[in-house]
Image: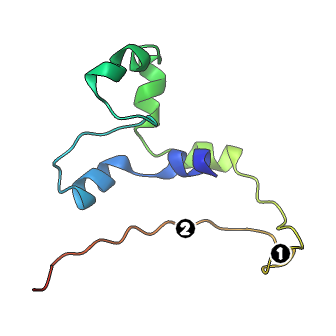
Amino acid sequence: MRKVLSMVMDRQQIVDVSYEGSTTLAALYWPSYNAMKPFTDLIDKGVYAAMLKPDLLRLQRVWRPRAMPKATSIGPKMAKSLQLELMCLTTLSS
């Protein structure tokens, strides 16, 4: 599931909305501190660039809905859609 979410999230939108443009894009599981640069440099630049963009076509090739286990409260229905909604406060009341 983590991989699927990583493929489809619009990181630029998260930066623009949640952080009001005050941070940089990050595609990795660790922060972009200078101490982490040796590890970040090991990742192919093309792969890193691709990780920064949402890729719905790749998701369609990879994602295969599976039946939910009978032990869940949902039952054995097929998972057919995945939605992610980003909510943020626009004003703070005092």
Q: How many marks?
A: 2
Residue at 46% of width from left, 46% of height from top?
A: 54
> Residue 58 location, x and y as percent?
60, 42
**Toward which corner of the image does residue 76 lie, by quadrant?**
bottom right
Q: Where 55 falls versus 73 (above or below)?
A: above
Q: Where 31 falls versus 44 (above or below)?
A: below
Within-10-Å neighbours for mark 1: few <14, some 14–19, many 20+: few
Which residue is nearer to you in this view: 36 or 66?
36
Kind of residue at disc 1: Lys
> Residue 80 location, x and y as percent?
71, 68
Kind of residue at disc 2: Gln
Q: Which residue is mark 2?
A: 83
> Residue 44 location, x and y as percent?
47, 16
Q: Which residue is mark 1?
A: 77
Viewed as shown, does residue 25 lie left or right of 19?
right
CA gap, disc 1 to disc 2?
17 Å
**In which quadrant will I find the C terminus?**
bottom left
Tag 1's secondary structure? loop
Tag 2's secondary structure? loop
Which residue is nearer to you in this view: 43 or 55?
43
Residue at 30% of width from left, 48% of height from top?
A: 12
Viewed as shown, does residue 75 lie left or right of 60?
right
Contact? badges 1 and 2 (CB < 8 Å): no
Q: Where 68 falls versus 14 (above or below)?
A: below
Residue at 83% of width from left, 75% of height from top?
A: 77
